[in-house]
Every structure is written in C-alpha cells, then in structure tokens.
Amino acid sequence: MKYAMFQFYVILCLLTVFSHPVSASDNRPVTVDVEGLSTIEGGKKAAARESALKNAFRRAIEQVVGVMIDSRTVVKDSELLQDKIFSKSSGFIKTYKINSETFEGDECRVSVKATVSAVRLEKGLHDLGLLSKKMGKPRIAVIITEQNIGNDAPVSSLSDGSVNAGIAESVINSVFEKKGYNLVDRDTLVALAKREGTLSSTGVMTSTDAAVQVAAGGGAEVVIVGQAVAKSGATVLSGTNMRTSDAMVSLRAVNADTGQLIASHSTNSRSANVNPTAGGSEAIKKATMELAEKLHQKIVARWTSNVTGTRTARLVVRGIEFAGIAKFREMLREQIGHVEETVERGFKDGVLTLDAEINGNAMELADELTSAGVENYKFKILSFTGNTLNVELLKQ
C-alpha cells in the first residue's frame, strides 16, 4: 500500500512540474482546471456525481500542494497529507465551476475549474509543520525621545536642532540593520514631522499616534517608539571617583498600518564612569541592546504569522442599493482574489459598511477593485487609510 502511494505521489509531483504552471507565490487564490472520476453504483448518478466532484477537488488541492512544498516532503509525509489535507479538500476550495459532466457506462466524469484558497491551504500545511516559506522583514522607522544626564529636557532626533540620532535610536538602527531590516531614512522622518506639525516646541513627538502617522508617511510598516532616560546614581564606587548612572528605556513596536501594538518592553540598566554623561550613555546603550533583541523576536513572530493568515479591512461602499448587497458580497468572494470572506456591519442611506477578511492590504484590494465590476457598475476609489477603504459604485 505504501509503495503504491509512493508511486502515486512521485507521478503527481512530475505532473505538477511538467504541466501548465500553477502559481502559489503569494496568498492569492489559485485557479486550476481538473477532472474528477467516480464509479456509478446501483444506478445512483447523483451520488456518483458528488463523488466525482470530491475527486476533482482533491486533485485541485494535490496540484497546489505540489507547488507549495517540495516533492521530497510530499513523498515523506504522504500519509499525513492524506489524513489532514487531501481528505478535507473541499474545505480549501473557495469557488468552483463545473465545465462539463458525462456519464458513460458505470463511470461519471466531471471537468471543474476550481479556485483554491491559498490562505486556508497554507495555514493547514503550516499547522502540520510542512510549509517552509520566507517572508521579507518589515520596513522599520525608529522614533525615540531621549534625555541623558546633563540635558535639561527630553530631546528627539526629529527636532530642528538635532543633528545626530540619540544613543537608543542609534543602537536600534544598528541592531535591526544588521538583522536585515530596511530602515526609513531619518531625514525623511524629520521632513515629514515638520510638514505634519507633529513635534512639540522641544522637538518631542506630541503622541504615539503622531509618531505612527509620520512613520507610515515615510513608508514604514512598523514603527519603534519610546523613551530613554538616564539619571545620576547616588552610589560612588569605593576608593574611586567613579559614580553610577542609571537608565530606564521603554520601547514599543507598533504596526504603522493599523496602529496595533506588536510588542512593548522596558528595562533598567546601570553603568559606572568618572563622567556622569558618559555613564548615562553607557547605561542607555546597555538597556537598549537588551530590548532590541526582544523587539526583533516579537516583530518576526508577528510578521511570520501574516504569511498564512488574513487581516481585517473595513470596506465602506457608497452608492449601493439594499437589494444589491447580496450580489455585491458574492462578487467580492468569487471575483476578488484578495477577499476571503465578508461580514456586514451596517447599511444606511446607500452606504454599506463591511469587514472583509483579505490576504493583502487595502491598496492591493483597491487596485483589484478598480478592474472589477458588478454588471453595469464600476468602482471609484475615494480613499484608503490604514486598513479602511472607501469606494463608490458608479453606473457605466
């Protein structure tokens, strides 16, 4: 039995490689043409048709799985795939269309165009530990307010008079750059902060929301915000003129697109130096180094989870009639690749509000909507901010 299954999956992998290409390079649904077969037993054609349809679904999932994971994994874990994936093939089918069906003798044959939900399938493979996929790290912006010993007030590197980044900011930039992150240029952030008027008279960000707004404007996907404060300690090391300096650093990583908190950490550190300011700098650096690694781990964990997941986008549609809502939602699910599911949140005065589970971002959804339509309507994109997209239905 195992040998027969081994042969089957080897043939499957070869067919997948040499047949027409099936792309599963992102989370968008994958459409494949497949054929399902079944035997007609006792003259029950309806049951045979249902069985052939399930067989077609299975073949569709087999094709896409053959692209998502390598052939050695397919062969090695064939029984696991059978139990957890292939036996539940219909659950991974987003939509399908029967192109033809025939009954010849005791055989039923159906030809199907099936759209596979890459999100659901990747999650299933990921949960089994079979999916190996790399995801690029997010672009980072760093905005930290710092007050070292000898400074009368907190200072932000985004202030007009600041030339260099603060100690904590420099540490974060250095650590994250070495780990392969792309960093938003500080000059870009300074220019945006000035234009948006989000700095106080002392050059400090007026709020976390303001920092996120500036970071998002600079193209950041994640913004690290926080503060670092150093103070002179009361302890003098015995027999020396060295005095301790204490630092407290508190940092948060925030999704610049949604404002959602990714991670929040704070720590204290102590250093000793004959120069209190130098001691404060050392203490800030030590504390920030500790936090940088923690933030990196949380950011990677959150970003990696996005590989196999969806996000919720708020979709506000103007110019729609109540009678057209059901058809509109059906169109979103079946024709818009980025949309997995929708939930109605309200309808008033021709304005429909939906929460859509999407496998991309609001901009990508906007791009796809502009090329779609509902009968004699087309979409006009009014605005998108974060994960909220405002559109208007226009008659053509």
Image: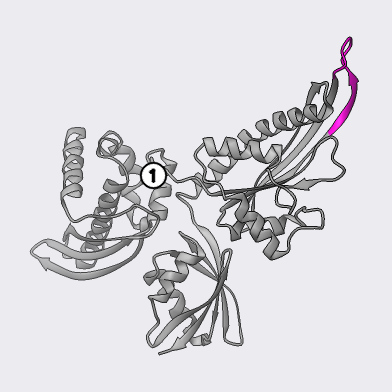
- State the SS at label 1: helix
Q: Position of residue 102 (x, y in %)?
A: 14, 68
Q: Quadrant of the N terminus?
A: top left
Q: Position of residue 152 (x, y in %)?
A: 87, 43
Residue 330 to residue 264: above or below: below
Q: Which residue sits at x=43%, y=73%?
A: 369
Q: How many marks?
A: 1
Q: Quadrant of residue 353?
A: bottom right
User: Residue 347: in sight, yes or no?
Assistant: yes
Q: Which residue sits at x=80%, y=37%?
A: 148
Residue that extends furthest to the right in the rendered view of this protein: 234
Q: Position of residue 185 (x, y in %)?
A: 58, 50
Q: Is residue 70 left or right of residue 389?
A: left
The region drawn magenta spans: 231-242
Q: Report the front residue among 356 and 55.
A: 356
Q: Position of residue 95 (x, y in %)?
A: 34, 66
Q: Quadrant of residue 81?
A: top left
Q: Report the front residue among 161 and 381.
A: 161
Residue 232 among magenta residues = yes
Q: Report the front residue among 44 and 356.
A: 356
Q: Which residue sits at x=48%, y=52%?
A: 309
Q: Amino acid at mark 1?
A: Leu
Packing grade of label 1 (10 A; few <14, some 14-19, many >=20) is: some
Residue that extends furthest to the top in the rendered view of this protein: 239
Q: Is residue 174 left or right of residue 25?
A: right
Q: Report the front residue among 101 and 210.
A: 210
Residue for badge 1: 125
